[in-house]
């Protein structure tokens, strides 16, 4: 989900700059977000490519099946009824995978692999490391112009803004929290006991703690309900048909700020324009995935191989309080 949401600024800019009819999106894994929970963001403008194997482009000499991806790539545009794509943007940096994707017929090809040396037009760009910012940096270099990155999502449908107004009343000071990580292999969550202390600290300062947590985290939700003063779970109060990233963006616009780990919700909050205090498990993840909005975000990353779970409430509060 985070990868899908993070590319929204690129799609917004491409759509406006080049007056595109539509974009084809290749996503690894079974959940095609632009076909379901993210469909209202761009509608039919983004067309997810479904007739390819999972992990398309992930090439390995030790997996014979992956050799078929080369043939699939060469026939992909024909299968979609396209002569060749005007632009292909490969977000990955693994050279062998990029070489597979580059087999798709195209006019222009952009990839950060080998510092954009495999791109057409070819450029050597060593900075920045941020996965989205570096794509804009490439366009700036090729077009010889400064790009104003669309930092916020521009057109939240009225049904989401109306729902948010019903849930979060305007006379309250809301402080958002996102503390769960969807990625199964990355340990980057706060200690629940410490985040409860943080939430209660701000509750005592007349903030209403608002937690973005999926229904499946039942034990965590019950723990927070029991131990956090005035806690609210806004998505649980919403129409089920509207529980998706656009609702999160609409809700976030009613908040003073939000405290979050590096996850999909962080990217949704960033697109809302709300002030964000983000906590990253390492400098590497901070450099790659931090919110693009420098003025409205403050970012903390762990050092010396320490985990976010080691952070004490006092440290989180001290880093966040002045910015909020």
Image (tube, rainbow, N blue to C red):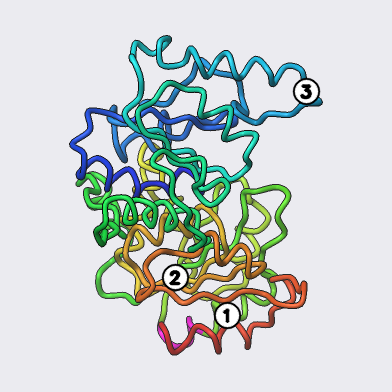
State the predominant SS element of the stretch in magenta. loop
* Mark 3 lies on residue: 63
* Marked residue nearer the N-terminal end (1 or 2): 1
Nearer the camera: disc 1 or disc 2: 2
Per the image, label 3 sits on a secondary structure element best described as: loop
Residue 207 forms part of the magenta stretch: no
Per the image, label 1 sits on a secondary structure element best described as: helix
* Mark 2 lies on residue: 258
Q: Residue at x 35, y 25 (%)?
A: 85
Residue 186 left/right relative to 119 = right
Cα distance, mark 2 to mark 3? 44 Å
Task: Tell me residue 214's x, y (percent).
Answer: 55, 49
Cα distance, mark 1 to mark 2? 12 Å
Near mark 2 (Cα within 10 A), the count class, few <14, some 14-19 or many ≥20, is: many
Point out the image quarter for the C terminus. Answer: bottom left
Q: Count the marks: how many?
A: 3
Which of the labelled discs sits on residue 198, or is there none? Answer: 1
Nearer the camera: disc 2 or disc 3: 3
Cα distance, mark 1 to mark 3? 48 Å
Q: Is residue 88 above or below residue 281?
A: above
Residue 41 left/right relative to 198 = left
Task: Tell me residue 196's x, y (percent).
Answer: 62, 75
């Amino acid at each position: 989900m985070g990868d899908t949401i993070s590319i929204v600024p690129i799609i917004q800019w491409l759509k406006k700059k080049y007056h595109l009819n539509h974009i084809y999106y290749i996503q690894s894994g079974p959940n095609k977000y632009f076909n379901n929970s993210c469909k209202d963001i761009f509608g039919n403008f983004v067309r997810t490519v479904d007739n390819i194997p999972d992990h398309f482009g992930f090439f390995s000499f030790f997996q014979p099946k992956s050799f078929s991806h080369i043939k699939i790539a060469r026939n992909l545009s024909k299968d979609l009824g396209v002569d060749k794509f005007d632009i292909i943007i490969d977000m990955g940096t693994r050279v062998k995978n990029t070489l597979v994707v580059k087999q798709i017929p195209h006019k222009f090809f952009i990839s950060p692999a080998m510092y954009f040396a495999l791109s057409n037009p070819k450029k050597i760009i060593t900075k920045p490391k941020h996965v989205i910012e570096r794509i804009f940096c490439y366009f700036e270099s090729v077009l010889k112009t400064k790009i104003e990155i669309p930092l916020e999502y521009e057109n939240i449908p009225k049904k989401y803004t109306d729902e948010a107004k019903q849930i979060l009343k305007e006379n309250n000071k809301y402080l958002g929290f996102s503390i769960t990580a969807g990625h199964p292999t990355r340990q980057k969550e706060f200690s629940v006991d410490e985040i409860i202390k943080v939430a209660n600290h701000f509750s005592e300062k007349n903030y209403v703690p608002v937690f973005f947590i999926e229904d499946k985290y039942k034990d965590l939700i019950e723990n927070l309900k029991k131990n956090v003063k005035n806690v609210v779970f806004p998505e649980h109060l919403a129409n089920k048909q509207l529980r998706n990233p656009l609702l999160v963006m609409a809700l976030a616009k009613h908040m003073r700020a939000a405290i979050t780990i590096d996850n999909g919700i962080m990217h949704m909050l960033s697109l809302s324009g709300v002030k964000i205090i983000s906590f990253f498990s390492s400098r590497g993840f901070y450099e790659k995935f931090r919110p693009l909005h420098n003025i409205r975000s403050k970012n903390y990353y762990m050092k010396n191989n320490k985990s976010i779970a080691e952070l004490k409430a006092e440290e989180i509060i001290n880093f966040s309080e002045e910015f909020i």
